[in-house]
Amino acid sequence: MARDGVPVSPEFAALISRVADGERVNVTAECAQLGVSRKTFYKYLKRFKAEGLDGFFPRSRRPL
């Protein structure tokens, strides 16, 4: 399957990986520094825990 779109930035992916490994960070401050919302952070954290690296790539917006 082809990967369309751009995955998340390397800094954002590193932050998600650190939190998934159990490191405690100030999510609000880190997200503000990277320019993403906390909602987006937790969305990608959930995807990363469920799917691994594939969770970082955009999903189809096609209606079901």
Image (cartoon, rainbow, N blue to C red):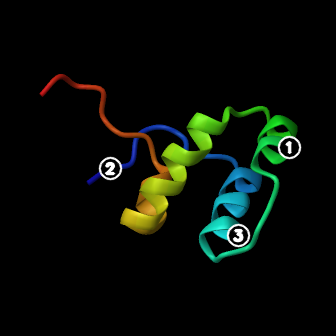
Residue 60 x/y as whole percent:
30, 34
Residue sitting at x 82%, y 53%: 26
Looking at the rendering, in which quadrant would you find the C terminus?
top left
Residue 51 x/y as whole percent:
37, 64
Task: State left or right for residue 29 relative to residue 24.
Answer: right
Q: Is residue 32 above or below residue 53?
A: above
How many numbered discs?
Answer: 3
Q: Label 1, on which residue? A: 29
**Which mark identifies residue 18?**
3
Q: CA distance from mark 3 to mark 1?
A: 15 Å
Q: Label 2, on which residue? A: 2
Residue 17 x/y as whole percent:
64, 67
Q: Amino acid at mark 1?
A: Ala
Looking at marks 2 and 1 on the same chain, the residue that comes earlier in the sequence is marked by: 2
Which SS class for mark 3? helix
Q: Nearer the viewer, mark 3 or mark 1?
A: 1
Which residue is more in the foreground, 61 or 35? 35
Looking at the rendering, in which quadrant would you find the N terminus?
bottom left
Residue sitting at x 81%, y 40%: 34
Q: Amino acid at mark 3?
A: Arg
Q: Residue furthest left?
A: 64
Residue sitting at x 77%, y 41%: 31
Q: Nearer the viewer, mark 3 or mark 2?
A: 3
Which SS class for mark 2? loop
Which SS class for mark 1? helix
Task: State left or right for residue 5 relative to residue 21.
Answer: left
Quarter-of-image position of residue 63: top left
